[in-house]
Each structure stands twice: as C-alpha cells, then as structure tokens.
C-alpha cells in the first residue's frame, strides 16, 4: 500500500532550468540597457561559467560578472540586472502542467506528500511559496536539514522517520536518475522518473516507472494500491 509520495522540487514540480534561462535573459537585457557594453552571448557565457564554478544558486553572480568584465561592480548596472532577474523569475516560476491536479488527486486519496530538495533551504521554501505549495507538503527536507545531498539515503530516511512510513509504502518522483532514483531505490522506495523534466537526455532512467506527464502518478498509485478500474474512472470523472 502506497501511503507517501516524495517529490523532488526543481525540474519535477517546476521547470527550474527554463525559469533560470528566462531570468538570466531578462537580466542581461537590463544590464546592456543600463550600459554594459558587451555582446549578449558573451555575457551569458560568462554568467553560466560563474554558475558552473560557484553553483547554480550563487547569489552574487552579477557582482562577480561585472568584476570579470569591467573590473569593478557598477551599481547602476548591478541593480538593473538584479531587478530584471527578479521580475522575470517571478513570472517564469510556474508549475508544470497538471501538477495542481495531481497533488489534489493524491491528497483526496489520503496520501501523505513530501519534498526532498538539494537546494538551499531558504531557496527551496521561497520557490514553494511562490508556487503556492508551501502548505501542501507534510514535510520538506532541503540541503541544510541533513547536510547531505541525494543520492545519500539520509534525506530519504529523515522523511520516512518523520512521517512514520516504511520504504515500501513510499514512491519517489524526480528528474535526476543518479540522485533521485538511485537514492530512493537503495532504500527500497519505488521510483518514478519525471521524463518531462529531463534536461540530460536520459535514456535509461533505472526507475520503476517513466512518465511524460505528472498526472500519470495518480494511476500508478491507484494501480499499486489495487483500486478497481471502475473506482479509478469514478475518481477521475470527479476532477
Ligand atoms: Mg530535480
């Protein structure tokens, strides 16, 4: 009997890579407009180079960029970049299609819901809040909660322990096979690969299920929980 669904956050519930690209595009445009006299692609290349070194959540990326390009932080340009980034991020931080419908359907079935994210705790909570999901999950485990990243079994154990759920009663969904799928499978948690969020061109996910639409989770859970076909159709027609 499945009683808990554990979600990865970035590229599973929200298209983080697309959001980042949109926000960076807007920031580049704003910084050029404020006087940064470099070709767009040169600036973009430099930003992603800095992210590669410092991590994708690096908060001082534009300061760093300006020092690299013009030898100092020009605050007129910096502010334009930050504001451009934030405005575009807010508009682009959205859920994948059918996420709300799926979460509601799972809640209606009495399932517990959790998030395990490798993102910094504050960034993970801010994204959940922007997405309107901050009250949906029974528990959220971000990087600082355990100090370990997936595929470490520690964050998975913490979620199971907090909710009093056995591994075989849980299902993990994520877009990163080496982290989300491997980590969960090692503990005996069933796994679902969010192919719709794949940015690596993954061929063999190693998961128990591969899905192209998050709503497929509902029929997977119903199948595992032995809900008769008719009941599945009845529940669906309510939605
Ligand atoms: Mg992810």
Image (tube, rainbow, N blue to C red):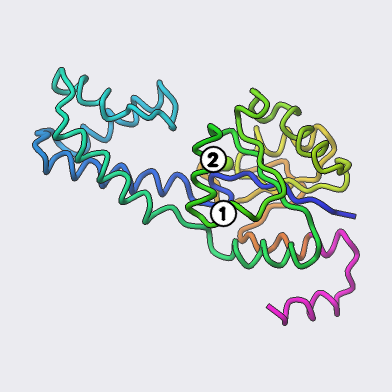
Q: Residues within 10 Å of mark 2 (few under 14, many from 20)?
A: many
Is residue 211 rendered to the left or right of residue 72?
right
Mark 2 secondary-structure assignment? helix
Q: Which residue is mark 2?
A: 124
Q: Which mark is residue 79?
A: none
Region rendered in magenta: 221-239
Image quarter (top left, top right, bottom left or bottom right) of the C terminus: bottom right
Q: In the rendered view, would you say 81 is above or below 237?
A: above
Sequence-wise first label, 2 or 1 = 2
Q: Is residue 123 magenta?
A: no
Judging depth in this view, the residue of 51 and 207 nearest the camera is 51
* Badge 2 vs badge 1, beta-carbon distance below 8 Å: no
Judging depth in this view, the residue of 200 and 136 nearest the camera is 136
Q: State whether the magenta stretch is mostly helix, strand or loop.
A: helix
Q: Which mark is residue 196?
A: 1
- Quarter of the displayed picture in which ligand 1 can be seen: top right
Judging depth in this view, the residue of 220 and 99 nearest the camera is 99
Image quarter (top left, top right, bottom left or bottom right) of the N terminus: bottom right
Q: Residue at x 70, y 44 (%)?
A: 139
Q: Quadrant of residue 77?
A: top left
């Amino acid at each position: 009997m499945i009683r808990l669904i554990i979600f990865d956050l970035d590229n599973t519930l929200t298209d983080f890579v697309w959001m980042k690209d949109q926000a960076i595009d807007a920031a580049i445009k704003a910084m050029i407009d404020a006087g940064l006299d470099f070709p767009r692609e040169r600036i973009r290349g430099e930003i992603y180079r800095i992210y590669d070194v410092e991590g994708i959540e690096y908060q001082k990326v534009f300061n760093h960029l300006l020092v690299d390009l013009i030898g100092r932080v020009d605050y007129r340009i910096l502010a334009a970049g930050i504001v451009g980034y934030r405005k575009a991020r807010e508009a682009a931080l959205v859920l994948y299609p059918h996420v709300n419908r799926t979460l509601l359907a799972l809640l209606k079935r009495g399932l517990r819901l959790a998030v395990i994210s490798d993102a910094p705790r504050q960034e993970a909570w801010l994204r959940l809040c922007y997405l309107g999901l901050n009250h949906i999950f029974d528990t959220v485990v971000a990087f600082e909660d355990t100090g370990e990243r997936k595929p470490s079994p520690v964050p998975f154990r913490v979620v199971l322990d907090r909710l009093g759920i056995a591994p075989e009663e849980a299902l993990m969904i994520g877009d990163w096979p080496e982290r989300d799928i491997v980590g969960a499978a090692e503990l005996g948690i069933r796994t679902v690969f969010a192919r719709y969020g794949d940015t690596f061109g993954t061929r063999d996910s190693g998961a128990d299920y591969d899905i192209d639409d998050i709503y497929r989770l509902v029929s997977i859970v119903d199948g595992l929980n032995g809900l008769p076909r008719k009941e599945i159709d009845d529940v669906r027609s309510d939605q």
